[in-house]
Amino acid sequence: MKPIRLTALGLIGILLGLLGFGATEMSDRASAATPVLPYSALGSMAVIAGFTLVLGIRVLRWRNSEKRTRMIDPIFAARTLVLAHACAYAGAVLLGWHAGVIADQIPVWTVRSTSPVVLQAVAMMGGGVIMVAIGLLVERFCRIPPEDGDEGENGRRKRGPSRTGDAEGGYA
């Protein structure tokens, strides 16, 4: 599996920011509610991020243990890595969408100094940042450093792809 690219997360955030801006503009014109997640969504985001972090810590403990009595279940490690990727991408989506909502609400700030919609969007952006950070952190937890057996004759790492396709070491 390939590592998360920060450029992809940035592009997702920008694209969803533009969509959020447009959706907020259309909802304002239609006198509809602003499309912002409620505060209760922060609880769901916290559960997902916490669960991802706990699973990542289990993989990290196995990776850093000096005496490994048994191998980690590869399906468990792969699922943890996929969950970390999903957490990071979901965080980028939420961050971008709510940044677009806030960008549309900037002209209204002079009329309404502290709008509850803006506060909700800021809270969701904070949750998105935390989800992206935890996703990237757990992805790093799942990375296995190159082993000693991967060195060639001259003490250098062998050229060519490893079994996981990553030149710096694979994932747990």
Image (tube, rainbow, N blue to C red):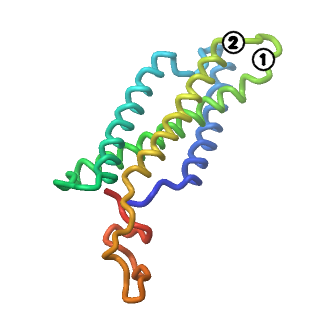
> What's the mark number on residue 167?
none
Q: Is residue 166 left or right of residue 25?
A: left
Q: Is residue 127 left or right of residue 31?
A: left
Which amino acid is tagged 2? Answer: Ser
| Quarter that holds the C terminus | bottom left
Residue 43 drawn above or below residue 115: below
Near-viewer residue (82 or 93) = 82
Q: Secondary structure at mark 2?
A: loop
Residue 165 in which image quadrant: bottom left
Please count the marks in the image.
2
Question: What residue lies at 66% left-to-right and 19% top-to-bottom?
Answer: 118
Determine the CA span between mark 1 and mark 2: 8 Å
Residue 58 in which image quadrant: top left
Q: Secondary structure at mark 1?
A: helix
- Residue lying furthest right in this view? 110
Question: What residue lies at 61% left-to-right and 23% top-to-bottom?
Answer: 121
Residue 134 drawn above or below residue 141: above
Q: Position of residue 53 (x, y in %)?
A: 39, 37
Say whether disc 1 or disc 2 marks the residue closer to the N-terminus: 1
Is residue 22 something one can see in this rendering? no
Asked if disc 1 and disc 2 are in contact, CB closer than 8 Å, the reply is: yes
Residue 108 drawn above or below residue 11: above
Is residue 155 something one can see in this rendering? yes
Near-viewer residue (136 or 128) = 136
| Residue neighbourhood size for the residue with mark 2, other residues' Cα within 10 Å, grouped as few (<14), some (14–19), many (≥20) | few
Location of mark 2 (residue): 115
> What's the mark number on residue 109?
1
Residue 101 drawn above or below residue 60: above
